[in-house]
Image (spheres, rainbow, N blue to C red):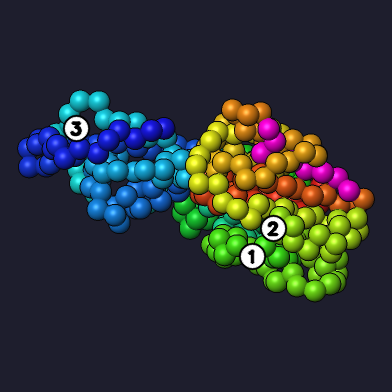
């Protein structure tokens, strides 16, 4: 969405002063952690934030952050209410609903990847259902509503208890090799506690399930690796500066947790082969494609999934490479 021009006009209400560019950010969005990160970024750069019931009011420029975070915002219509309270507390609260012994998590919340890594390090069960719902088989997070609530609060997640679930993909701790040279890729894996090692030299099949490469890098090694059953994730080496919209095939595991339509970086690569997982809305060209080769596969991106709203696509691809289909 385009931001209006910033103007130095202020509206005074009681003892508070509001900038003319004031945005409404509603709680209860798909990923409460994304709302928290957007508000924290805004506050760190000098924006003022108020809480008004189930929404936040942000006085300041947000630029492209809503698109990067995947957070819906809207300009404030009319004057802010007198009951708005200035705040710096944006942390979402973990919650549990339902009854049963099986813990389910929403794949749309990026915090699920931190919870997944934590549980896999404890050698506990994590799986994906066919619709992307995350299914836990864990003594740490399950077995009682109290344990589920403690886990949900630890990772700021919304957990649901059910009597039973049918997993489709059993996750394993990733054996990930990193050959892409872009620093943001390593930072992403470190942020979400995904272990990786440098994929230099040979022996990929013995060391890794998945290798992330840049365009044109290690082509001969990656071909041999894929033919033997490995997963290669290809990322473009050039970053797209502008944002455009893409549509996603939500039944595809790489797209689990995404909305049907989301803002992504503009294309810097053209994908001509493979099953299409996402398309750019305006051009209709492939944004993500998966191509089977030998016993393995290549998952290619036409854009860099380096934002909060799109990084789960890359994380999904990595976990899929180590997963066992049930």
Say how many tags the image has: 3
Q: Nearer the viewer, mark 3 or mark 1?
A: 1
Residue 252 image point, x, y percent: 72, 38
Tell me which numbered mark, 3 or 1, is placed earlier along the sequence: 3
Q: In the drawing, does residue 201 fall left or right of residue 263?
A: right
Q: Mark 1 points at which residue?
A: 181
Taking the spot 60% from the left edge, 62% from the top edge, the residue there is 182
Numbered range of the magenta stretch: 285-293
Query: On the image, which quarter does residue 75 sit in?
Result: top left
Q: Which residue lies furthest to the top in this view?
A: 78
Question: Does residue 59 lie above or below 89 as drawn?
Answer: above
Q: Do the residues labelled 2 and 1 touch (CB within 8 Å)?
A: yes
Secondary structure found at label 1: loop
Question: Depth check: 194 or 185 in front?
Answer: 185
Q: Mark 2 points at which residue?
A: 214
Question: Depth check: 316 or 276 in front?
Answer: 276
Q: In the drawing, does residue 284 fall left or right of residue 38?
A: right
Q: In which quarter of the image is the C terminus?
A: top right
Query: On the image, which quarter does residue 271 sit in?
Result: top right
Residue at mark 3 to residue at mark 1: CA–CA distance:
47 Å
Q: Do the residues labelled 3 and 2 touch (CB within 8 Å)?
A: no
Q: Which of marks 3 and 2 is in front?
A: 2
Q: Residues within 10 Å of mark 3 (few under 14, many from 20)?
A: some
Residue at mark 2 to residue at mark 1: CA–CA distance:
7 Å
Q: Mark 3 points at which residue?
A: 80
Question: Does residue 231 lie above or below 267 as drawn?
Answer: below
Residue 162 image point, x, y percent: 62, 39
Residue 137 image point, x, y percent: 68, 52
Secondary structure found at label 3: loop
């Amino acid at each position: 969405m385009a931001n209006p021009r910033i103007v130095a006009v202020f509206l005074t209400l009681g003892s508070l002063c509001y900038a003319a560019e004031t945005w409404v950010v509603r709680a209860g969005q798909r990923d409460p952690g994304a709302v928290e990160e957007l508000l924290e970024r805004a506050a760190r750069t000098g924006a003022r934030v108020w809480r008004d019931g189930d929404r936040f009011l942000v006085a300041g420029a947000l630029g492209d952050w809503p698109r990067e975070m995947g957070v819906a915002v809207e300009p404030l219509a009319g004057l802010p209410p007198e009951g708005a309270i200035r705040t710096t507390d944006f942390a979402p609260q973990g919650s549990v609903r339902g009854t049963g012994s099986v813990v389910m998590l929403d794949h749309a919340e990026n915090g699920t990847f931190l919870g997944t890594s934590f549980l896999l390090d404890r050698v506990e069960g994590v799986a994906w259902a066919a619709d992307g719902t995350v299914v836990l088989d864990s003594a740490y997070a399950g077995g009682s509503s109290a344990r589920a609530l403690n886990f949900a609060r630890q990772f700021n997640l919304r957990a649901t208890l059910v009597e039973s679930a049918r997993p489709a993909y059993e996750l394993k701790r990733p054996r990930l090799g990193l050959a892409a040279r872009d620093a943001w890729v390593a930072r992403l894996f470190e942020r979400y506690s995904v272990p990786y090692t440098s994929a230099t030299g040979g022996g990929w099949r013995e060391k890794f399930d998945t290798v992330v490469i840049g365009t044109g890098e290690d082509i001969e090694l990656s071909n041999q690796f894929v033919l033997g059953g490995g997963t290669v994730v290809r990322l473009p080496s050039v970053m797209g500066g502008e944002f455009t919209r893409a549509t996603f095939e939500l039944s595809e595991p790489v797209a689990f947790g995404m909305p049907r339509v989301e803002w992504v970086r503009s294309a810097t690569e053209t994908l001509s082969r493979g099953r299409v997982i996402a398309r750019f809305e305006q051009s209709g060209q492939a944004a993500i494609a998966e191509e089977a080769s030998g016993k393995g596969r290549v998952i290619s991106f036409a854009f860099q999934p380096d934002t909060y709203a799109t990084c789960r696509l890359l994380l999904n691809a990595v976990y899929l490479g180590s997963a066992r289909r049930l």
